[in-house]
Amino acid sequence: MWKNHFSKLLSRSVPAETTRGNWGPGLSCRRVLGIGLVGAMVSIFALAGSILLGAEPETRAKNVILFIGDGAGYNTFLATAMYLGKFDPKTGKTQLEFEGPEWLRVACATYPLSLSSKPQKTGIQDPELVYDPAKAWDKQTGYQWLTKTATDSAAAGTAMATGQLTYNNAINWSDFDQPLSPTLVEIAKKRGKSTGVVTSVQWSHATPATLGGAKVPRRDDYETIARQMLSAGVLDVIMGAGHPAFDNNGQPRSPDQYQYKYVGGKEIWEALEAARAKPEGTYLGFRPVVTKEEFAALCSGPTPTKVVGTAAVADTLQASRSPSRMESPTVTPQGDKKETGSSSQSNPAAGQQSYGSAVGTLPSDDLTAKPFQHPRVKTVPDLPTMVAGALNVLDDNPQGFFLMVEGGAIDWANHANRPDRMIEETIDFLAAIETVLRWVEKHSSWEETLVIITADHETGLIWGPQADKVPFQPLVDHGPGRMPGLRYLSTRHSNSLVPLFARGPGAERFHRWVQGEDPVRGPYVHLTSIFHVIASAITGEHTGKEGQSATAFGLGTYLYLPVFSCEPSFPALLGLRARN
């Protein structure tokens, strides 16, 4: 009865065509229980959950690798799969390497605590931001709701790094204007593991900053972030773009103070360069690397204990190369990047019907650029090479490691409404994932390594070529090597669900964090669940915090209560049954 009522509520105003085919529900479970329990029932269930979760120790993982495709929603992956010929039009399903039956698959909500750009000192969740399937799939207002309630990468990264919801703009910083602890890298370090972050954008950007353990109230305080990442003692590998002396095409330039901030300021950069000039020189224990050859050398043989790699390019490894509409991105108070350039992509009146968001768009057929059409920057490593090097450094630790890998420039391409660059960046991201999967099979095993693949949010509100007139129109497959039919409906982030895949020890714990069921994507968790799952996998305990009970862990600062599982035995033990 309850499920039928809930399904009817959620299916209102949802177009039928979106429920078929591409990237539908994948989490295997009999029923998903709701969260509409209040008062005494919350206390009873929380107590019961604590007792049950305390019955046996959690599965531990020696190694944990978290992949974050920044801005990569369902249709980002789908468009790339179509281009690669990994989409079956008969079944409407993609055939990516991490979609086999051995992988757990679930949707993930990304909403923040608030859209404020500074602490409100209340810790109160803005209810309008909480993912609501009925609002998200509404034919008339869905696009608008999705684009006006979105997280930024700072709040999203904080959710994954600490398990806490916070305001947009915060890097591991609370709504009460305090740093948040512990972060995942702190937990991993305490357990004797090595840690690292790798990205295709500046290494002090929001996602590597949060997952790298930095703590600042504003995401644009890059200099402080970089200094913390180097000096806090919780990172062993830092890799990304952001070289002050090279432009987006990998050409030398004369840097100014603005360019130095991404690497901690001019003084820090000069110290890094001085250390690099010595055969075995280090700065704060880090061996600096810059050239493509230096990155490649890390992939095999002996390595330094700690490495900071700053590729010889400015903003991104490849996405911002010429011709580009992604030059000199700026950050709004909400943390969104806005591209400069093409007026056809940012004209609020372009192609808009009543369904559109606040920005105009063009379908991909109106854009002549194709993936890899323009020459690549040849003097920088690609993301798979950086990942291979990071693995070779980190796996020297017999206690294991935690590594975050970000396909950061997927977001930049989607902000700029560039499907060609979006597909390029997603292909590089998929190649980095394949590098890790091969490493697990050759040097580790699925019994000791946990791999999670997800996004911090969706960017661009990507749908079919006529989606401005036909709400939520599916993408159109034109075959391998051809651009799929698609349209961007925004240049900003959206509150859409994103995909999440997991395999390895502890992956099954995502079942315990299901918040609800979406009529199109199926059961969904929240980004905060990633912290809980990884922390438990690292510690072998029911929480990521020493001495804290599962009840406190579940309720937390913001009363973030986990749904009591998709696992059939779990609700049954509580004396609950979902009716047909």
Image (cartoon, rainbow, N blue to C red):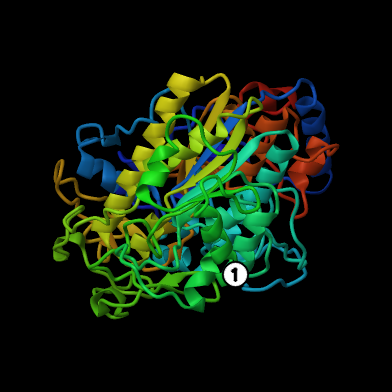
**Of the pair 114 and 142, the residue shown nearer to us:** 114
Image quarter in which the N terminus is found: top right
* Residue at 59%, 48% in the rendered image: 286
Image quarter in which the C terminus is found: top right
For residue 574, above or below residue 387: above
Give the residue at mark 1: 267
Q: Is residue 545 visible?
A: yes
Q: Position of residue 160 (x, y in %)?
A: 61, 48
For residue 564, above or below residue 123: above
**Of the pair 444 and 33, the residue shown nearer to us:** 444
Q: Amino acid at mark 1?
A: Glu
Q: Circle 1 — which element?
A: helix
For residue 238, above or below residue 88: below
Q: Quadrant of residue 374?
A: bottom left
**Of the pair 352 and 114, the residue shown nearer to us:** 114
- In the drawing, does residue 278 fall left or right of residue 321? right
* Residue at 82%, 38% in the rendered image: 546
Q: Position of residue 117 (x, y in %)?
A: 62, 73
